[in-house]
Amino acid sequence: MEQAGLPFRCTEYDYDEQDLSGLHAARSIGMPPEQVFKTLVARGDKKGVLVFCIPVCCELDLKKAAAAAGDKKVEMAAMKELLPLTGYIRGGCSPIGMKKHYPTFIDETAQLYAEIAVSAGMRGQQLLLAPDDLIQYVDMTVCDLTE
């Protein structure tokens, strides 16, 4: 983000190995769960690896995810695939700086806020930035993704 010249803040919190949930992250940094986005990795039947960012208080709607990606079916990637595919581990997966650039989608609710949080790529660290900056930098598609 620094290289791109985009404004952001980084915040740290004590993560809990027993609770790597986004809700824990949101509580820990004092932000509403609607403004803290988790990064999910999935596979489409045609497009392959896909990345979805949704509020931590929501669930990914796999039918909406498939429609957004132009696939008939989308399944969550296995946990053991996360590190080899993205370079990140569970609880620290960021939409920024993955090993490869995958088609990436963000829930449309991100644009309701001046600032959102996403993982900074390590457990216990969140990036806070303007959603439009994130969308442009990562080349995300904005759509309805949640149940």
Image (cartoon, rainbow, N blue to C red):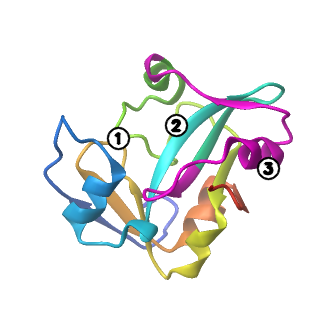
Determine whether, in the image, residue 98 is placed left or right of residue 19: right
Horizontal and vertical percent for residue 59? 54, 50
**Amino acid type shown at disc 1:** Gly
Q: Which residue is mark 2?
A: 98
- What's the distance in space between the residues labelled 1 and 2, CA to CA? 11 Å
Q: Nearer the viewer, mark 3 or mark 2?
A: 3
Residue at 55%, 70% (x, y): give it.
131
Around disc 1, counting alpha carbons within 10 Å, would you say few (fewer than 14), some (14 to 19), or many (20 or more)? many
Horizontal and vertical percent for residue 72? 85, 33
Kindly check if marks 1 and 2 are in contact, taking CB atoms under 8 A apart as contact: no
Q: Which residue is mark 1?
A: 92
State how many labels appear. 3
Which quadrant: the C terminus? bottom right
Residue placed most toward the observer, 124 or 97: 124
- What's the distance in space between the residues labelled 3 and 2, CA to CA? 21 Å
Residue at 84%, 26% (x, y): give it.
46
Q: Quadrant of residue 100?
A: top right
Number of the label disc, if any, that sits on residue 68: 3
Q: Which residues are magenta?
A: 53-80
**Amino acid type shown at disc 2:** Met
In the structure shown, which secondary structural element does the residue marked by tag 2 occupy? loop
Q: Quadrant of residue 141?
A: bottom right
In the structure shown, which secondary structural element does the residue marked by tag 3 occupy? helix
Answer with mark 3 or mark 1, whichever residue precedes in sequence.
3
Determine whether, in the image, residue 145 is placed left or right of residue 11: right
**Amino acid type shown at disc 3:** Ala
Q: Quadrant of residue 7?
A: bottom left
Residue placed most toward the observer, 102 or 142: 142
In this rendering, the answer to whether 9 lies above or below 145 is: below
Residue at 51%, 80% (x, y): give it.
113
Residue at 60%, 75% (x, y): give it.
111
